[in-house]
Image (tube, rainbow, N blue to C red):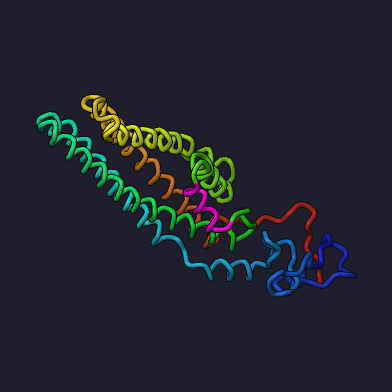
């Protein structure tokens, strides 16, 4: 592959898009010459990078579904919180156990649905970013599996989202997102859900009652907070990705020493 500094035009071909500029590389996709203005990450010319990105369906629809299911999950958590505060104390002990178990099962079903929609969105986002180049260093499938593999899913998803944000807007964009708070709330919420389930199990039934009620209240509060944080992250990343895909955030400035060469 051609890879030389511009300027020595006597020995270099010219860029077909900008005939006044010497080529610095050949496109890895189409083989045409490209100057520094046309060259894009991944060794592709501007047209091929654009076409490769357009071949991947955008993630807007999946972002909408992920946002919607997150709101549904948050709504279920609010209903659970109100139920625990207003109706749970009035029930008989046997009815309390049944109601608490039912709310827990419903929350798990809604939570799994929201998680599936979120992971479908993550898969599409990683696929788009890899097409835009340079490669994120992970396949879309691996980005999803990191949320599912035991032990790894306690910290790796945070780095997946951080890498996505960094690719879209650098560390300044990462700092503007509540990623650390979001993941901290997620971890604490998972611990509370596990504790709530254990308190409702037969082994810890004797320790249930007030303890399970308090844990359930805390779990609902953390679930609601997690929804709002997650929705904000999804929306802001999707906006940046749409801008990147459409080239709205790209400002071409001549590189220092990259003077135009007359044909």
Judge from the rendering whether residue 94 lies leftward or rightward of residue 30; answer left or right. left
Q: Which residue is at the far right?
A: 10
Looking at the image, which is closer to me, 70 or 168? Answer: 70
Answer above or below: position of 253 versus 204.
Answer: below
Left/right of residue 14 with respect to residue 10 in the rendered view = left
In the rendered image, the quadrant that contains the C terminus is bottom right
Q: Residue at x 50, y 57 (%)?
A: 125
State the residue at coordinates (39%, 40%): 229
Q: In the picture shown, does residue 175 fall above or below 32?
A: above
Quadrant housing residue 84? top left
Q: Is residue 123 magenta?
A: no
Classify residue 93 by image quadrant.
top left
Q: Is residue 142 magenta?
A: yes
| Magenta residues, start to end | 139-149
User: Could you tell me how many numbered marks the image carries?
Assistant: 0
Residue 99's place in the image compared with 27, above or below, is above
């Amino acid at each position: 592959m051609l890879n030389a500094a511009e300027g020595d035009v006597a020995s270099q071909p010219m860029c077909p898009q900008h005939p006044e500029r010497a080529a610095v590389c050949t496109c890895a996709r189409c083989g045409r010459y490209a100057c520094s203005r046309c060259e894009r990450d991944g060794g592709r010319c501007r047209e091929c990078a654009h076409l490769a990105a357009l071949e991947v369906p955008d993630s807007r629809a999946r972002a909408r579904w992920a946002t919607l299911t997150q709101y549904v999950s948050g709504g279920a958590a609010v209903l659970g919180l109100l139920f625990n505060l207003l109706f749970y104390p009035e029930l008989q002990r046997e009815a309390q156990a049944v109601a608490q178990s039912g709310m827990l099962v419903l929350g798990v079903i809604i939570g799994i649905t929201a998680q599936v929609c979120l992971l479908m969105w993550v898969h599409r986002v990683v696929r788009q970013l890899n097409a835009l180049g340079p490669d994120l260093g992970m396949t879309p499938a691996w980005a999803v599996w990191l949320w599912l593999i035991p032990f790894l899913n306690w910290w790796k998803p945070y780095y997946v989202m951080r890498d996505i944000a960094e690719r879209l807007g650098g560390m300044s964009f990462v700092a503007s997102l509540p990623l650390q708070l979001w993941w901290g709330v997620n971890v604490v919420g998972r611990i509370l859900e596990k504790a709530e389930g254990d308190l409702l199990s037969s082994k810890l039934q004797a320790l249930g009652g007030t303890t399970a009620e308090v844990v359930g209240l805390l779990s609902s509060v953390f679930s609601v907070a997690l929804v709002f944080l997650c929705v904000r992250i999804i929306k802001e990343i999707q906006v940046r990705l749409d801008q990147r895909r459409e080239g709205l955030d790209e400002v071409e400035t001549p590189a220092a020493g990259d003077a135009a060469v007359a044909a």
